[in-house]
Image: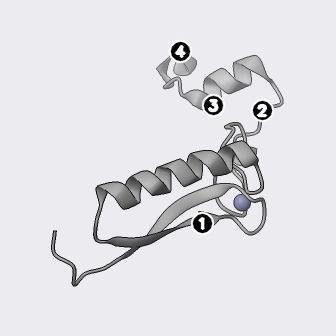
């Protein structure tokens, strides 16, 4: 009966599709991002365009943002986050 009392999570369905699926292997060791998702990568022109557009939008929407730095993982080049430099003096 026990096997019917298990929650069905993503791992369950991944294993159904691929019996060799290893749950410990699903995220990169370097930055903890999913290997099974196509994230944005450093050096990809299309991704860079998306990043540029996003940063332009941030600068437009938030007048107290001085600059935005896209942070990539040093190991695998996956995009991690945007780091904004905020001008705390500036009033809206
Ligand atoms: Zn990484």
Quarter occupied by residue 39: top right
Q: Residue 69 appears at what percent x and percent y?
A: 54, 69
Q: Are marks 4 and 3 in contact (CB under 8 Å)?
A: no
Q: Are marks 3 and 2 in contact (CB under 8 Å)?
A: yes
Q: Is mark 1 within 8 Å of ligand 1?
A: no
Local SS, label 3: helix
Could you tell whether 25 is left or right of 64 in the image? Answer: right
At a point 70% along the width and 42% down the height, the residue shown is 46
Mark 3 and mark 1 lie on one chain; the one further toward the N terminus is: 3
At a point 48% along the width and 25% down the height, the residue shown is 7
Mark 3 and mark 2 lie on one chain; the one further toward the N terminus is: 3
> What residue does disc 2 label?
21
Q: Is residue 89 visible?
A: yes
Q: Residue 72 appears at what percent x and percent y?
A: 66, 63
> What residue does disc 3 label?
11
Q: Are marks 3 and 1 in contact (CB under 8 Å)?
A: no
At a point 67% along the width and 46% down the height, the residue shown is 47
Q: Nearer the viewer, mark 1 or mark 2?
A: 1
Going by the picture, which residue comes out furthest to the left? 91
> What residue does disc 4 label?
1
Mark 1 and mark 2 lie on one chain; the one further toward the N terminus is: 2
Local SS, label 4: loop
Mark 4 and mark 3 lie on one chain; the one further toward the N terminus is: 4
Could you tell whether 91 is left or right of 3 in the image? Answer: left
Local SS, label 1: strand
């Amino acid at each position: 009966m026990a096997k019917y009392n298990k929650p069905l999570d993503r791992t369950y369905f991944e294993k159904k599709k691929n019996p060799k699926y290893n749950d410990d292997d699903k995220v990169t060791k370097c930055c903890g991002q999913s290997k099974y998702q196509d994230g944005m990568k450093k050096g990809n022109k299309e991704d860079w365009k998306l990043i540029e557009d996003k940063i332009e939008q941030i600068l437009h929407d938030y007048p107290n943002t001085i600059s935005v730095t896209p942070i990539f993982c040093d190991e695998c080049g996956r995009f991690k986050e945007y780091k904004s430099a905020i001008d705390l003096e500036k009033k809206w």
